[in-house]
Amino acid sequence: MRFEFHVNGATVGAAQWEGPGQVALEVEDGTTRSRLADYFADETTYLSTGFGQEEVFQIRRRDWTPWEFERACMALGHRMGYRVVRTPNGPVEASA
Protein backbone atom coordinates (compact mmCIF):
# COMPACT_ATOMS: atom_id res chain seq x y z
CA MET A 1 0.00 0.00 0.00
CA ARG A 2 1.56 3.28 -1.16
CA PHE A 3 0.41 6.88 -0.90
CA GLU A 4 1.85 9.99 -2.54
CA PHE A 5 1.51 13.45 -1.03
CA HIS A 6 1.16 16.53 -3.27
CA VAL A 7 0.87 20.24 -2.57
CA ASN A 8 0.24 22.90 -5.23
CA GLY A 9 0.91 20.37 -7.99
CA ALA A 10 4.34 19.38 -6.64
CA THR A 11 5.10 15.99 -5.09
CA VAL A 12 6.13 16.24 -1.44
CA GLY A 13 6.94 12.55 -1.15
CA ALA A 14 5.51 9.08 -0.76
CA ALA A 15 5.01 6.55 2.01
CA GLN A 16 4.67 2.79 1.53
CA TRP A 17 3.46 0.35 4.17
CA GLU A 18 5.66 -2.75 4.16
CA GLY A 19 4.61 -4.43 7.40
CA PRO A 20 3.79 -3.69 11.04
CA GLY A 21 5.93 -0.74 12.07
CA GLN A 22 7.65 -0.64 8.65
CA VAL A 23 7.01 2.38 6.44
CA ALA A 24 9.37 3.21 3.58
CA LEU A 25 9.52 6.93 2.85
CA GLU A 26 10.50 8.52 -0.46
CA VAL A 27 11.08 12.14 0.51
CA GLU A 28 13.92 14.36 -0.69
CA ASP A 29 13.68 17.11 1.94
CA GLY A 30 15.32 15.99 5.19
CA THR A 31 13.02 18.04 7.43
CA THR A 32 9.90 16.66 5.76
CA ARG A 33 11.31 13.11 5.92
CA SER A 34 11.93 13.45 9.66
CA ARG A 35 8.45 14.89 10.23
CA LEU A 36 6.78 12.04 8.30
CA ALA A 37 8.87 9.35 10.02
CA ASP A 38 7.91 10.72 13.44
CA TYR A 39 4.27 11.02 12.40
CA PHE A 40 3.92 7.40 11.29
CA ALA A 41 5.84 6.02 14.29
CA ASP A 42 3.67 8.01 16.72
CA GLU A 43 0.69 6.52 18.51
CA THR A 44 -2.95 7.42 18.09
CA THR A 45 -5.94 6.69 20.31
CA TYR A 46 -9.10 4.91 19.16
CA LEU A 47 -12.35 4.60 21.02
CA SER A 48 -13.11 0.88 21.44
CA THR A 49 -16.56 -0.68 21.53
CA GLY A 50 -16.50 -1.18 25.27
CA PHE A 51 -18.44 -4.45 25.05
CA GLY A 52 -16.74 -6.95 27.31
CA GLN A 53 -13.62 -4.84 27.55
CA GLU A 54 -12.32 -2.94 30.50
CA GLU A 55 -10.37 -0.48 28.34
CA VAL A 56 -12.51 2.08 26.56
CA PHE A 57 -9.59 3.44 24.51
CA GLN A 58 -7.00 1.63 22.43
CA ILE A 59 -3.59 3.14 21.75
CA ARG A 60 -1.85 1.94 18.59
CA ARG A 61 0.95 3.05 16.28
CA ARG A 62 -0.16 4.69 13.04
CA ASP A 63 1.92 2.21 11.04
CA TRP A 64 0.88 -1.02 12.74
CA THR A 65 -1.75 -2.28 10.28
CA PRO A 66 -2.68 -1.38 6.68
CA TRP A 67 -5.97 0.08 7.91
CA GLU A 68 -4.22 2.33 10.44
CA PHE A 69 -1.62 3.35 7.86
CA GLU A 70 -4.27 4.32 5.30
CA ARG A 71 -6.20 6.27 7.92
CA ALA A 72 -3.00 8.02 9.04
CA CYS A 73 -2.16 9.02 5.45
CA MET A 74 -5.59 10.57 4.96
CA ALA A 75 -5.37 12.39 8.31
CA LEU A 76 -1.88 13.64 7.45
CA GLY A 77 -3.14 15.02 4.15
CA HIS A 78 -5.94 16.85 5.91
CA ARG A 79 -3.61 18.21 8.62
CA MET A 80 -0.83 19.37 6.25
CA GLY A 81 -2.98 20.45 3.29
CA TYR A 82 -1.64 17.66 1.06
CA ARG A 83 -3.55 15.98 -1.72
CA VAL A 84 -3.21 12.26 -1.01
CA VAL A 85 -3.14 9.77 -3.89
CA ARG A 86 -3.06 6.01 -3.47
CA THR A 87 -0.70 4.57 -6.07
CA PRO A 88 -0.05 0.96 -7.12
CA ASN A 89 3.06 -0.69 -5.80
CA GLY A 90 4.80 -3.97 -6.48
CA PRO A 91 5.20 -6.88 -4.10
CA VAL A 92 7.37 -6.29 -1.06
CA GLU A 93 9.28 -9.54 -1.59
CA ALA A 94 10.00 -11.26 -4.88
CA SER A 95 8.21 -14.59 -5.14
CA ALA A 96 10.41 -17.64 -5.68
Image: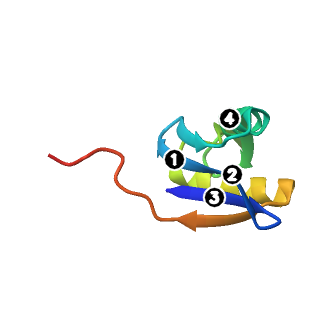
| 10 Å crowding of disc 1: few (<14), some (14-19), many (20+) | many
| Disc 2 versus disc 1: nearer the observer | 1
Instruction: Name the residue rendered at 74%, 39% in the picture.
Output: 29
Q: Earlier in the sequence, mark 3 or mark 4?
A: 3
Q: Name the foreground residue: 28 vs 80.
A: 28
Residue under label 1, please give it: 17
Instruction: Name the residue rendered at 20%, 49% in the picture.
Output: 95
Is residue 56 visible in this depiction of the protein?
Answer: no
Three-letter amino acid code at disc 1? Answer: Trp
| Disc 3 versus disc 4: nearer the observer | 3
Q: Earlier in the sequence, mark 2 or mark 3?
A: 3
Rendered image: mark on residue 72: 2
Label 1 to label 3: alpha-carbon separation: 12 Å
Rendered image: mark on residue 67: none
Label 3 to label 4: alpha-carbon separation: 14 Å
Q: Are marks 2 and 1 in contact (CB under 8 Å)?
A: no
Residue under label 4, please give it: 37
| Left or right relative to 77: residue 71 | left
| Disc 2 versus disc 3: nearer the observer | 3
Three-letter amino acid code at disc 4? Answer: Ala
Rendered image: mark on residue 4: 3
List x then y, in percent, for residue 6.
73, 61
Q: Name the foreground residue: 28 vs 57.
A: 28
| Disc 4 versus disc 2: nearer the observer | 4
* Local SS, label 4: helix
* Local SS, label 2: helix
Q: Name the foreground residue: 54 vs 18.
A: 18
Label 1 to label 4: alpha-carbon separation: 12 Å
